Structure formats: structure tokens, C-alpha cells
Image (cartoon, helix red, strand yellow):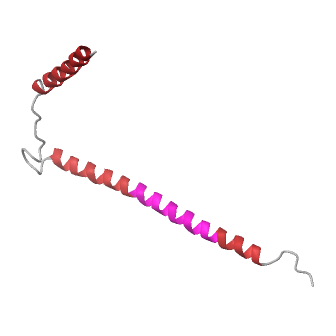
Amino acid sequence: MIQKRLATVSLVILACLGALLSAHPALACSVCYGDPNSAMSQGAEAGLLVLLGVVCTVLMGIGSLMIYWTRRAAYLGALEAASRAVPSDSRP
């Protein structure tokens, strides 16, 4: 049992070590290594701004929906409290 586990752990460590040693070095982008005014870096900046705009729009929509639900719950609670306070059968 212990030998089986040791063999499995050794195989996993060997596979991880092999993957680390066979990895190629990453090449730098145009901002890190090159002209920051190139079309590639300007496109990357534009893409980031678009994604930031989409995320902000979605978060603002979720926040406004929560505010709407909170106000509506308060309104319906007040309406229900008012209907309980006034008896429906108020004949003299």
C-alpha cells in the first residue's frame, strides 16, 4: 500500500518536473518589450477599456435592480400596513 502510494507520488512529481523543464520562455508583449505606441498595444488598451465598460455596465444594472427591489418591497410593505390599519368594513 505504501509502495503504491510512493510510486504514484513519485510519478506525479516526475511529470511536474518534466513539464517545468520543457516549458519555453514567454515572449514579452509590445508594451514590455518594444514600442508602447504600436498598434498592438493600442488595441490591447482599447480591448481593456471595452471590457471594463461592459463589467461596469453589468454591475450598475445589478445594483440598480437591487435598489428597485428594495424600494418596491418598502412600498408594498407600507401599502400592506396601511390596508391593515384601515378596516375594510367601516359602516356607521
For the record, the magenta segment spans 57-75
Of 51 and 39, the residue lying toward us: 51
- Name, please, the residue furthest toward the bottom: 92
- Rendered view: 1 above or below 48: above
Residue at image location 8% in from the left, 48% down from the top:
35
Of 85 and 47, the residue lying toward us: 85
- Rendered view: 69 above or below 11: below
Residue 62 in the figure: left or right of residue 78: left
- Name, please, the residue furthest toward the left: 34
Instruction: Give how far across and how far down residue 7 sits, in percent.
Output: 21, 16
For the N terminus, the quadrant is top left
Residue 73 in the figure: left or right of residue 14: right
Residue at image location 19% in from the left, 50% down from the top:
42
- Rendered view: 51 above or below 15: below
Q: Classify residue 60 by image quadrant.
A: bottom left
| Residue 41 on the magenta span | no
Instruction: Give how far across and how far down residue 83 sits, in percent.
Output: 75, 73
Residue at image location 76% in from the left, 73% down from the top:
84
Instruction: Give how far across and how far down residue 49 sits, in percent.
Output: 28, 54
